């Protein structure tokens, strides 16, 4: 009699993230904008954010985060690079091949995924598909964005929110029962609401904040429930929810809907703002660095973004070395 084999899965085995060194506190931002530190803090939770220097590209941020993630695995052996970004360096080609080349991975499959703030979860699902179809054994998944360039300089509703950063994970082929194995993915979109957050060709970001807020809370709550259910967990079993960091009030409202208290919600928006596709891997790296994420924790990643798009997945946190804190000794300081 043969023992049935556990099904194949993508397993998280590396993590790294970086923030650009320049800190812009609310007070500095307010100097040129009709807003206040008090308004930004109380309505969004953001105190400061990191803004990349003009000469730092999305590829530069992605490479710095990816290098950290690869370093944490002790190997540069990857078969594909999937980059989630809303701020590619060029309209064409995609930014991922540049990232691969800068990492010395010339010849490796590399492409971008565009799903705005849900991009990282879409990229994880894409990478998991590459692994389970045996197209790749190891995939580098990066979320990198320079979101700060999208709002108009005088737009007080969007400029305080958006900022820059990058995070990356390495996924390898493994089995669904191992710690680190990504659970079932739930992805969705509704383009009928595309106008709620849009950057028209050649223009600046336009956002209908309150409507977007309501959709974000509803969609993230629903997709989290679905992913947890598909993993055969209960919401009460979730040790850490790692939501896309769009607004501290959105995260709190999702927590209320799902009865997940603040201790179980990973939050770093205070110091980073909304970093688009980088948001979840940045939060993961920070939580790994400060011990908020521990081996054996049941974790749910959940995201919502323009499109509209949404997505979630689950994993049991593996036995990873704690990540370097994204704000410490950032390689960006040396460029
Ligand atoms: N400073 C001072 N006043 C402001 C500011 C500001 N920075 N921004 C807006 N206001 C004013 C408005 O003009 C309005 O004034 P009025 O009442 O005189 O008209 C008042 O504050 C209230 O405005 P609202 O837009 O209702 O404020 P709200 O509490 O909803 O907060 C915010 C706005 C922070 C944008 C919020 O709606 C939000 O976070 N929305 C969701 C964003 C989101 O979900 N993003 C996820 C997707 S991100 C992605 O995919 C890239």
Image (spheres, grey):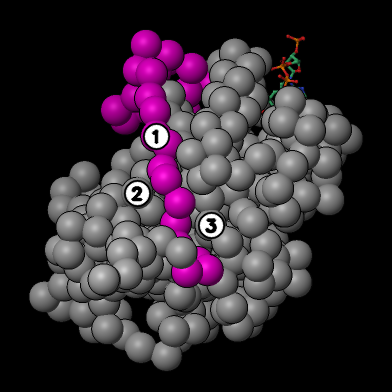
User: Can you say whether 65 is above or below 251 in the image?
Assistant: below
* Residue that carries the numbered disc 2 in the rendered image: 125
* Residue that carries the numbered disc 3 in the rendered image: 315
In the rendered image, residue 212, in percent from the top left (x then y), is placed at 57, 20
Q: Nearer the viewer, residue 181 or 119?
A: 181
**Mark 1 or mark 2: whose residue is earlier in sequence:** 2
Q: Is residue 60 magenta?
A: no
**Mark 3 or mark 1: whose residue is earlier in sequence:** 1
Helix, strand or loop at label 2? It is helix
Residue under the image location 64 percent in, 56 percent down: 298
* Residue that carries the numbered disc 1 in the rendered image: 187
Would you say the beta carbon of the disc 3 residue lies within 8 angstroms of ligand 1? Answer: no
Q: Nearer the viewer, residue 219 or 163?
A: 219
Q: Locate residue 99 relative to residue 233 in the image: left or right.
A: left
From this viewpoint, which residue is outermost toward the front? 1
In the rendered image, residue 124, in percent from the top left (x then y), is placed at 38, 53
Residue range in magenta is: 178-207
Helix, strand or loop at label 1? It is strand
Would you say the beta carbon of the disc 2 residue lies within 8 angstroms of ligand 1? Answer: no
Residue under the image location 57 percent in, 26 percent down: 222
Q: Nearer the viewer, mark 2 or mark 3?
A: 3
Q: Are marks 3 and 1 in contact (CB under 8 Å)?
A: no
Q: Nearer the viewer, mark 3 or mark 1?
A: 3
Quadrant (top left/top right/bottom left/bottom right) for the N terminus? bottom left
Would you say the beta carbon of the disc 1 residue lies within 8 angstroms of ligand 1? Answer: no
Q: Nearer the viewer, residue 324 or 50?
A: 324
Marks 3 and 1 sit apart, C-alpha to C-alpha, by 16 Å
């Amino acid at each position: 009699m043969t023992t049935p084999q556990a099904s194949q899965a993508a397993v998280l085995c590396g993590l790294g993230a970086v923030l650009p060194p320049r800190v812009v506190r609310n007070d500095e931002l307010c100097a040129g904008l009709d807003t206040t530190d008090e308004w930004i803090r109380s309505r969004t939770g953001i105190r400061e954010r990191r803004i990349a220097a003009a000469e730092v590209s999305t590829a530069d941020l992605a490479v710095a985060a990816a290098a950290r993630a690869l370093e944490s695995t002790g190997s540069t052996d990857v078969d594909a690079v999937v980059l989630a970004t809303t701020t590619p360096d060029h309209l064409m080609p995609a930014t991922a091949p540049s990232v691969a080349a800068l990492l010395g991975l010339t010849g490796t499959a590399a492409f971008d995924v565009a799903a705005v703030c849900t991009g990282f979860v879409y990229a994880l699902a894409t990478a998991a598909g590459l692994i389970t179809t045996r197209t790749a054994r190891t995939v580098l998944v990066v979320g990198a964005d320079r979101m700060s360039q999208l709002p108009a300089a005088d737009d007080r509703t969007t400029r305080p929110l958006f900022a820059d950063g990058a995070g990356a994970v390495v996924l390898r082929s493994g089995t669904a029962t191992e710690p680190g194995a990504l659970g079932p993915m739930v992805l969705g979109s509704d383009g009928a609401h595309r106008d709620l957050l849009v950057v028209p060709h050649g223009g600046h970001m336009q956002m209908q904040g309150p409507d977007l807020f309501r959709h974000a809370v509803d969609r993230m709550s629903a997709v989290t429930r679905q992913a947890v259910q598909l993993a055969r967990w209960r919401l009460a079993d979730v040790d850490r929810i790692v939501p896309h960091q769009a607004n501290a009030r959105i995260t709190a409202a999702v927590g209320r809907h799902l009865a997940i208290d603040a201790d179980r919600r990973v939050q770093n928006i205070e110091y980073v703002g909304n970093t688009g596709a980088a948001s979840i891997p940045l939060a993961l790296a920070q939580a790994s660095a400060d011990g908020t994420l521990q081996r054996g924790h049941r974790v749910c990643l959940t995201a919502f973004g323009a499109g509209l798009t949404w997505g979630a997945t689950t994993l049991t946190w593996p036995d990873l070395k704690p990540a370097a804190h994204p704000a410490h000794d950032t390689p960006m300081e040396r460029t």
